[in-house]
Image (cartoon, rainbow, N blue to C red):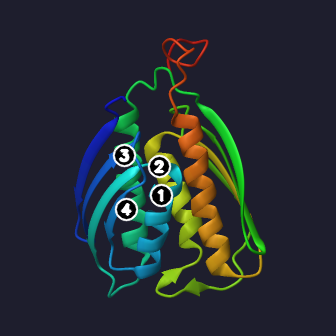
Amino acid sequence: MSDRTATVTRETAETSIECAVTVDGSGTATVDTGIGFFDHMLTSFAKHGLFDLEIDCDGDLGVDDHHTVEDVAIVLGTAFDRALGDRAGIVRYADRRVPLDEAVAGAVVDVSGRPRFYFDGTFSQASVGEFTSDMARHFGESLAMNAGLTLHLTVDGRNAHHEVEALFKALARTLDDATRLDERREGTPSTKGTL
């Protein structure tokens, strides 16, 4: 098993975050962001992506959930970027659709080093607990920008809890597929020789 791990800390006037990620993990997570539903989503992300994840965030939740969700995504994306290194031997591309009852979400990723983000869909309710539903979209965007991903996300449904959860699960499964090492590949998966 490879040693694709990284630990990242980030301190701002809005949040204080410690994050450790193991790409080739077993799906264990220890998460505390102060937002119950977000903790649930990050735990699900780890479980379904088979990533080991430790995240501790002290954020300005008295303002709202924006800075906490955004900054966790920034730090998690940075950790993935560092853990993947030069991306030698990875599959690179993947796509998944994941249902949760009436909801279905899709993720298409290129672990290209060229950050781009596209989103199609809406959330049926404005929030799930203390988590603003649209922050799921913003989480994907912030993760992509800092992990160096081209990421397309879609979601459809009638219940925001299901929509957001399906989205996190689709993202997890897609990232697991794309970051997996392919023993047939040598070097960086690009005709340019670099990503």
Q: Which residue is mark 1?
A: 47
Q: CA distance from mark 2 to mark 4?
A: 19 Å
Q: Nearer the viewer, residue 75 or 102?
A: 102
Answer yes or no: do the residues labelled 2 and 1 have beta carbons within 8 Å? yes
Helix, strand, or loop for circle 1?
helix
Find residue 29 and report its horizontal and vertical position in percent.
36, 60
Give the Cα separation between the discs numbered 3 and 1: 20 Å
Q: Residue at x 57, y 62 (%)?
A: 168
Which residue corresponds to mark 4? 72
First along the sequence among labels 4 and 3:
4
Which of label 3 and label 2 is nearer to you?
2
Query: How many other residues sit within 10 Å of disc 2, few (<14), some (14-19) or many (≥20)?
Result: many
Identify the image quadrant of residue 61.
bottom left
Q: Mark 2 belongs to which amino acid?
A: Leu
Q: Earlier in the sequence, mark 2 or mark 4?
A: 2
- How much space separates mark 1 and mark 4, taking CA atoms? 17 Å
Dot 3 alpha-carbon crowd within 10 angstroms: few under 14, some 14 to 19, many 20 or more: many
At label 1, counting other C-alpha atoms closer than 10 Å, the crowd grade (few under 14, some 14-19, many 20 or more) is many
At x 37%, y 57%, the residue is: 28
Residue at numbered disc 3: 78
Q: Which of the two discs, 3 and 1, labels the residue nearer the N terminus?
A: 1
Quarter assignment of residue 33:
bottom left
Disc 4 to disc 3, C-alpha distance: 10 Å
Q: Secondary structure at mark 3?
A: helix
Q: Which residue is mark 2?
A: 50
Q: Amino acid at mark 4?
A: Val
Q: Amino acid at mark 3?
A: Thr
The amino acid type, in three-letter code, at marker 1 is Lys
Q: Quadrant of residue 12 in the image? A: bottom left
The answer to whether mark 2 and mark 4 are in CB contact below 8 A is no
> N-terminal of the two: label 1 or label 4?
1
